[in-house]
Image: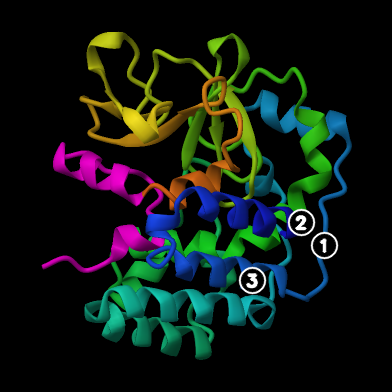
Amino acid sequence: MTELRQAWTELLARRRSLAASLAPYGEMLERWAAWTPPRRSLSWSAQRCRESWARAVPLAAEAPPPLDAGDVEDLLGGAMEEVAAVDPARAPALQRLAGAWDAGAIGPDALLPRRDGLGDGSVEAASGLDARAVAFLSYATLRPVLEAWLEPARPHFTEVDWGRGVCPFCGAPPGFADVVEGGHRRLACHFCGGAWGFAKLRCPLCGVEGSKDLQRLQAEGEDAGYVISGCRACRGYLKELDRRERWNGGPPLLEDWASPHLDVVARREGLRKPLPALLDLARTP
């Protein structure tokens, strides 16, 4: 988390005009860095990890981290306060979520990604929150937990042919995309910090293939190198950064947070992204 905090400081220096509106993200990073419960780690061997990947199963789907409600309560509470601040209309649903959490009706397991994407709907059912808010609360709560849990498995992913549009480590949908050397596309996970290669002419959100269904909105001027990569079939999108052009770009999660103006453009095109950032939840007139 120290590296993310430093990278955020550097990124804000390049986005000075947005620094005030982006302040809540810095508070989230500080909260992640201050998280102190035992940072348990997955102890699977390379062979065991690759057996799971060969069956197209994300690691955390078969080996979820041991979670205690008290371990993540401060993380969830801080994220809920931030959502209420950007959209007070969600406050009653957030209060219902807090009540269900305190009563033990909802626990941290409900926030975990599943084998093929996000949770089972129990948080939405208990609280009345919309799925977008639940998605944000989930990764805002679980990022330091999942990152620590899955860190030992990262080196085992070398030369693994994954090919799925969900994270091979935790199962969450991608939150950002990078273009790296050779023009290869790499997807990034906001839930656990994982990354994996993916075909350029295939939608990672619905799997449709071929250029006719892909929609690319190329940024210009100061934002040259950024692209809104959308899909006409599912109306989903990811923001994408060409690292060959923007060699000094920050980590994918931070680049997503620091470019809310690109999300505005995407929404005007009728596109939606699978993992909203905090400012995507802001109430608009």
Other-residue count near label 1 (Cα within 10 Å), few / some / many at <14 / 14–19 / ≥20? some
Q: Which residue corresponds to the image point at 52% horizontal and 22% vertical from the top-left? A: 245
The amino acid sitting under disc 2 is Ala
- Under circle 2, the secondary element is helix
| Closer to viewer: mark 1 or mark 2 | 2
Q: Earlier in the sequence, mark 1 or mark 2?
A: 1
Image disc number at residue 148: 2
In which quadrant will I find the C terminus?
bottom left
Q: Which residues are magenta?
A: 260-285
Report which quarter residue 100 is drawn in: bottom left
Q: Is residue 223 above or below residue 281?
A: above
In percent of width and height, residue 10 lies at 61, 51
- Under circle 3, the secondary element is helix
The amino acid sitting under disc 1 is Arg
In percent of width and height, residue 99 lies at 43, 90
Residue beneath label 3, please?
Answer: 30
In which quadrant will I find the N terminus?
bottom right
Residue 131 in view in this figure: no
